[in-house]
Image: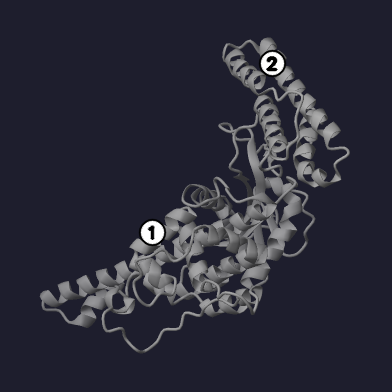
Amino acid sequence: MQPKKQISSPQLDMFRNRLESILNHRHELYRLSGLIDWGVFECEFGKLYSEEGRPGVPIRLLVGLTYLSHAFNTSDEETVRRWVENPYHQYFCGEGYFRHELPIDPSSLSRWRKRIGEQGSELILKLTVQAGLASGAVAPASLERVIVDTTVQEKAIAFPTDSRLYNRSRERLVRLAAAWGIRLRQSYSRLGCQALLKVGRYLHARQRRRAGREIKRLKTYLGRVYRDIVRKIEDQQALRPMFLPELALAERLLTQQRQDKNKLYSLHAPEVECIGKGKAHKKYEFGVKVSVATTNRDNFVVGMLAEPGNPYDGHTLARAIEQVERITGRPVERSFVDRGYRGHKIQEPRVLISGRRRGMTPQMKKELKRRSAVEPVIGHMKTDGKLGRNYLLGELGDKINALLCGAGHNIRLILKKLREKLLLLFVELLLALWCYSDGQKKSDGLSALAK
């Protein structure tokens, strides 16, 4: 059913004070709540609900919790717990009075992210750009010049090894067979654990030949269990849909070779890719490539796009610029990229590659020097946000998490801008009072401040 609408009533509660009357109106979260157009979310996300059934959770509450989760890098459980303790969080999410109970179950945020999908997450990012324009955190002219770069959004998986993958796949097949009453010839539960333990010991002692023999034994155990299940469900058509996903993963493990592409690195996240970005401290990263677009002047995120399949950087530029224009509503006049984007084959808008010398005006040279400013932005999204490790499921989870990480970074920039404005106002007031104490006029104090 359609969610409840949070309508503030002019009638007061006799025994409770409204949050507006007890909060500091200069607080950055209080001021940010007035900069976001919450009605857009009500109109767009309200279409995703049916007209019948139990009333849904207010949309502003869900959007506000999403903003808070990615702005302060907290899990769904931690976000909901902080919401109960912090009155500013409650006011930001549309509450009129302070509440002492949990607003929703944390699992509701997972289901809601699946409901809004990639387009809804892009709308959440788009509204942060509009709030940035209203707060002064980003200038309108900055939206026409962007920096585009790629990074790796790592998935929440363990470092993949052949021995662990073989043993884990065998355990999953054995557990699934026991759940559906399939009696196996042998489960290899004891032998598999012993072989896995020996692999770790042999590799620690640098006895690679012995470790290779135990890895081959683990692969043999997996192949025997796999073929045993295939034989026993061959005549049971009803059980095939239950075993088909796990059998397909086991078959990929058994058939993949060292030099193959699209290898399987995780059983619970088969979409994970191995990406090498040339880092000295981390040769390979396991996740998905993400294209990041920021403004050249204000470091404001105006585009986040997950690119499955590990495409060449130059082939992602057209889609990144298209997304930026869709989010900002302005054409991109110049885009600044590194040398990994050579061969992009884009004529307009003009693309300036790092290291270019010909046909450069002084203004272009000055803007191109800021191309590397996107690197600390990516670093902040990985340390202060959730871009460093993605816990959402599947390729859709990769796309949603990337977009929401950009929204969280923008929210942090807006809050910082609002705090700076408040501090500047306080300094101006102190200087004006200091000038009055010396017997000067107020105009003299303000003119001295301007100088």
Amino acid type, mark 1: Arg
Contact, mark 2 vs mark 1 (Cβ under 8 Å) = no
Name the residue rendered at 57%, 78% in the picture.
Answer: 42
Q: Disc 2 on helix, strand or loop?
A: helix
Q: Position of residue 339 (x, y in %)?
A: 68, 46
Q: Quadrant of the C terminus?
A: bottom left
Q: Position of residue 41 (x, y in %)?
A: 57, 75
* Residue identifier under label 2: 214
- In the picture, measured across the screen, residue 270 lies left or right of residue 404, that is right
Q: Is residue 144 visible?
A: no
Q: Is residue 204 visible?
A: yes
- Residue 346 vs 235, above or below: the answer is below
Name the outermost residue toward the right: 235
Q: Position of residue 113 (x, y in %)?
A: 60, 61
Q: Earlier in the sequence, mark 2 or mark 1?
A: 1
Q: Disc 1 on helix, strand or loop?
A: helix
- Residue 4 vs 414, above or below: the answer is below
Name the residue rendered at 73%, 60% in the picture.
Answer: 319
- In the picture, measured across the screen, residue 80 lies left or right of residue 256, that is left
From the viewer's side, name the closer residue of 415 and 354.
Answer: 415
C-alpha gap between disc 2 and disc 1: 49 Å
From the viewer's side, name the closer residue of 68 and 411.
Answer: 68
Q: Position of residue 228 (x, y in %)?
A: 81, 28
Question: Alpha-carbon neighbours of circle 1 within 10 Å: few (<14), some, or many (≥20)?
Answer: some
Q: Quadrant of the N terminus?
A: bottom right
Residue 286: quadrant of the picture: top right
* Residue identifier under label 1: 82
Residue 92: quadrant of the picture: bottom left
Amino acid type, mark 2: Glu
From the viewer's side, name the closer residue of 358 and 129.
Answer: 129
Residue 407: quadrant of the picture: bottom right
- Residue 203 vs 434, above or below: the answer is above
